[in-house]
Every structure is written in C-alpha cells, then in structure tokens.
C-alpha cells in the first residue's frame, strides 16, 4: 500500500508541538477529546529545542563562569577554565530531558503523536507530508484544528543564514566553540541575552542596532542597567546602524552597516549573528485551502477565544501575534482546548508577564505609568532600589529597582517593572496581585520572608503608600 492512501480521522488536530501546541494537545486530552498532534521537527518546538531553554542554560553556565572569576571582593580567586564542548553537552542534556518529558506527557494524556509536516487540503482535512525516509503523505480529517506552527527568525537582505559565517539564534546556540569575535545585529532581547553569554565566555562582541538604544521595547530606565553592565563586559555598541552586507575577509568576515546619512561603517569578526526579530510560520500551511487569511505580516487574527475566522479552526502562540512568548502560547493553547471542549474560557492579557534574562534581568507585567495614564487611571508609583535590599547586597547583585504602578484612588495594582537580580521570578508575585485585583495595601500587608529579594516588592508597595521603612518616601 502507498503511504498516501492512508486516511485517518481525529476530533482535534493540533499542528505544531511547541509550548502552544503540546499544551493545547495535553489539555484537550485531559478533557476527554480525541487528539492528534503533528510535529515536523522536534517536540517542544522553538522554546525547548532552540529558544528559551538552551539560551537560559547557556546564561546560567556563563554567569557561573563569569561570577566565579569576578569574586575577588568576596575573597575568591579563580583561574577560569571553560570547556565549551562540555558546557554545550550539559545544555543539550537539559533540552533532551525536557523534550522527552513532553512526548511522555502527551502519550500519558492519550494524545496521538504523528511526525510530518501538515498542510491544509480543505477546511476539514490536512495532508501530513513525511519528509526524508519513508516519504509520502497521509490525509487526516479533523472536526476542529489548532494551528500552532510558531515562528522563525527574520532574514535580512544580504545576510542569508549559512550556519557558518551568518548565524540565526538557533545556530548561535549550537556553535561548537566560542568565536573569538562576533557581530550581533539587533539589540532586542535575543541579541542582548546572547551578547551577554558570549562576552562572559570571552568573545569579543560588537552589537549593531538600527534604533538608538538597547532593548528598545522597554522603558529607558529598565534598559539602562543592562547597557551599563554590557559596557562593563566590554560589549561594543553602535546605534543608528543598519546592516547592509558582509564579505569574507582573511579567516573571518567584514560586516558593512550604514547610518541614516548613508555613511558606511565596517566591523570585522569571525561570525555575525542576526537577531532582528521573528516572523510567524504561516506560509507553508496552505491556509487559503482552509479559507483563512493572514495579515500583511503573516499573523493569523483570532478572537478572545483563540478562534480564527473559521469557527472550528483556532490559532495560538507566535502565529497569533505578539507578544511572541512561550507562556502566552501555552495559555492560549489551554484556552483553545477548553473552548473546544465547551468550557467558558477566554483570553485575558491584562497580567501577561515578560522577562528578559540579561544581566541584570528585566521583568514586567501589566501597565507602565504612561499606559496607565493613557487608559484614564490616576497612577501612583512606588520605587525600591535593590541597593537598599539586604538580600541583594549579600548576593553581590544589587543593581536595579522594583517599580509598582497602581491606581491612586482605588489602590489597585496595575503594573510592575523590575530590573535587577531575579526580576524574572519577582514579577510573578505582582502578576498574581493584578490577576486577583489586589491593592497596594494587600501587597504591603503581606509579610515577606527576611532576608529575601521579594521584600523589595513589599517595600515598593509601602513606598507607593508613603510609608516604606528602608527607603525615603515620596
Ligand atoms: C533564542 C530564543 C530565546 C527565547 N527565550 C524565551 C524566553 O526566555 N521566554 C519566552 O517566553 N519565550 C522565549 N522565546 C520565544 C519562544 O520560544 C516562543 O514564543 C515559543 O516557542 C512560541 O511557541 P509556539 O508553540 O507558538 O511555537 P514554536 O515553539 O515555534 O513551535 C512551533 C512548532 O511547530 C512546528 N511546525 C511548524 N510548521 C509545521 C507544520 N506545517 N506541520 C507540523 N509542524 C509544524 C515546528 O517545527 C515547531 O516545533 C525565545 C525564542 C528564541 C528564538
């Protein structure tokens, strides 16, 4: 029999096994639905294989190496000896432990796993194309489908990814050696996180950015401590520079950039990493055959129940638009599965956190002061510097601050911005506060363990109320 003859059916077809798709499939399985999950590459998607997890593993390892060799003021003297190959092996081990876990959890929840690339044949069926060995395709009919095909790095003209000289983030995380020098195009979170890793491991890092600051999506005072530390690490920044082309030179490359006056600059390095953003993977799905259109950027529009213009087809995660974050994809996956199962779930982005794992970290949730004002609130803002935190000083990392934005008349917490040690963890408490409709009084009245970084959150709420103990009040 030819493989193409096989035709199977499923209640819920999930396309793509990233943090959106596998979570949707597991949740749908828990709710008693018959689910098939199709993946063309690796379970866990970008996040587990090529994104969040490998980058955070490399951040931990490079921080450890850097901190250990910069602890003379604590009386610790080391001679750094990094075996990069072993570091990468450790990182790969973490990834495979997690991706294996995803596969097991899917199976344990009754999800049928299918390997191959899905493309729509019509509104109720897909062809699953098996590439490589055992080629061919099969048809899967579905009652409802969830599109979770994620995103890929944006390629800029003149910089085709070749894995050797011109790298995307995935290739940069899989290098066999630390390059002696690297040019990073783009000072967004992916570029800045990897710049920190490489600089801490001894690479000579140059960052070129078209705009005029690092992390342009974040408020200036949050980005400033990150830039300051990056300067200390010796990262060389060039703003207002658009990357134009590159050429081989000697045993490396030269990257040419242009400023707005057309003046050209040249930067020599061993490699260039292009991290200028990501685009949705919707162009390989035959979406027209399902009757679904994308916007001009390729994103699929959805309503607050994750439904596309076709009521029985859902879109979640990076394909459904910004913010392109793993926890947003997973939440949307849970909502889509629950809606399919007839539950009254809906999407609510009010308390969607975001974290940047630079040194220091940034964690944000909810509204900034400006956004609160624009939305008609009367914001009151509390601040607490980590310099005043006993715990921060004992960790040797006391840069940055906690800021809470609340509505003055009601006291409701509306948002928080943190830059400093463990900002990615600390922001969770304020996400819960927003979700629960907590006030500044609620946060301030909650006893926080001493000495912990989390006390900074409590003190920050007290500062907004005008009675912080360990800082001067407003
Ligand atoms: C370097 C880097 C670091 C990151 N760090 C963080 C972080 O710290 N925190 C965070 O929240 N986010 C982070 N992200 C973003 C995060 O990885 C994404 O937001 C998240 O993976 C989106 O999940 P998703 O399920 O929508 O898509 P993806 O994870 O991209 O998964 C989509 C899956 O669909 C599969 N697929 C595509 N087309 C088809 C098809 N036609 N048929 C079958 N399968 C298909 C793909 O192979 C892939 O496995 C990072 C990203 C990168 C690149």
Image (cartoon, rainbow, N blue to C red):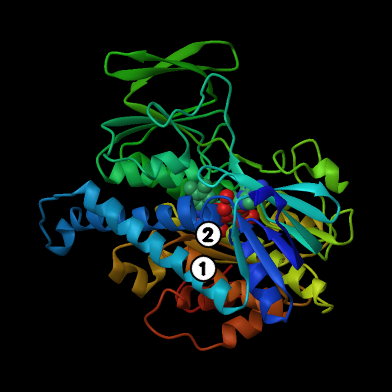
The disc label shown at residue 316, or none: none
* Location of residue 309 with respect to 206 vertically, above or below: below
Residue 62 picture location, percent across and down: 29, 52
Judged left or right of residue 163, residue 16 is right
Reading the chain from its start, which is encountered first: label 2 or label 1?
A: 2
Residue hosting label 1: 103
Question: Circle 2: is it few (<14), some (14-19), or many (20+) Cα within 10 Å?
Answer: many
Residue at horizontal 69 percent and vertical 48 percent from the top: 4
Judged left or right of residue 204, residue 100 is right
Residue hosting label 2: 43
Q: CA distance from mark 2 to mark 1?
A: 7 Å
Residue at horizontal 51 percent and vertical 54 percent from the top: 42
Judged left or right of residue 408, residue 60 is left
* Location of residue 330 with respect to 186 vertically, above or below: below
Question: Circle 1: is it few (<14), some (14-19), or many (20+) Cα within 10 Å?
Answer: some
Residue 318 picture location, percent across and down: 66, 51
- Depth check: 13 or 48 in front? 13
Q: Quick check: can you spot residue 96?
A: yes
Residue 383, quarter of the rendered image: bottom right
């Amino acid at each position: 029999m030819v493989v193409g003859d096989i035709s199977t059916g499923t209640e819920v077809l999930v396309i793509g096994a990233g943090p959106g798709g596998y979570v949707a499939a597991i949740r749908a399985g828990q709710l008693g639905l018959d689910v098939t999950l199709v993946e063309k590459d690796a379970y866990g998607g970008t996040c587990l294989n090529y994104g969040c997890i490998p980058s955070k593993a490399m951040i931990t390892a490079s921080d450890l190496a850097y901190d250990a060799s910069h602890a003379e003021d604590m009386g610790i003297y080391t001679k750094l000896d990094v075996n990069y190959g072993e570091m990468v092996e450790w990182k790969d081990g973490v990834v495979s432990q997690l991706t294996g876990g995803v596969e097991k959890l899917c199976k344990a929840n009754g999800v049928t796993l299918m390997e191959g690339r899905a493309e729509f044949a019509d509104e109720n069926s897909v062809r699953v194309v098996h590439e490589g060995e055992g080629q061919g395709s099969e048809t899967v009919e579905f009652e409802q489908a969830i599109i979770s095909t994620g995103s890929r790095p944006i390629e800029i003209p003149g910089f085709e990814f070749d894995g050797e000289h011109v790298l995307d983030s995935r290739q940069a995380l899989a290098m066999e050696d630390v390059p002696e020098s690297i040019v990073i195009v783009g000072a967004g979170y992916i570029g800045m996180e990897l710049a920190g890793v490489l600089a801490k491991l001894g690479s000579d890092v140059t960052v070129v950015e078209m705009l005029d600051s690092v992390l342009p999506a974040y408020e200036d005072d949050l980005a400033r401590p990150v830039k300051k530390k990056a300067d200390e690490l010796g990262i060389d920044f060039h703003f207002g520079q658009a990357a134009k082309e590159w050429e081989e030179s000697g045993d490396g490359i030269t990257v040419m950039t242009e400023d707005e006056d057309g003046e050209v600059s040249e930067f020599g390095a061993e490699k260039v990493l292009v991290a200028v953003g990501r685009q949705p993977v919707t162009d390989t799905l035959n979406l027209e055959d399902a009757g679904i259109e994308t916007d001009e950027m390729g994103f699929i529009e959805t309503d607050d129940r994750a439904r596309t213009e076709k009521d029985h087809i859902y879109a979640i995660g990076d394909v459904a638009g910004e913010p392109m974050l793993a926890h947003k994809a997973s939440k949307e996956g849970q909502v889509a599965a629950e809606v399919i199962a007839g539950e009254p779930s809906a999407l609510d982005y009010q308390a969607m956190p975001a974290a940047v794992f630079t040194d220091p970290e940034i964690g944000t949730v909810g509204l900034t002061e400006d956004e609160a004002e624009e939305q008609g609130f009367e914001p009151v803002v509390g601040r607490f510097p980590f310099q005043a935190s006993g715990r921060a000083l004992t960790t040797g990392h006391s840069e940055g601050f906690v800021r809470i934005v609340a509505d003055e008349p009601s006291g409701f917490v509306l948002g928080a911005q943190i830059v400093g040690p463990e900002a990615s963890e600390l922001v969770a408490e304020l996400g819960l506060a927003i979700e629960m409709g907590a006030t500044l009084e609620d946060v301030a009245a909650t006893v926080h363990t001493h000495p912990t970084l989390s006390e900074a959150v409590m003190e920050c709420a007290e500062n907004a109320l005008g009675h912080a103990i360990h800082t001067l009040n407003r």
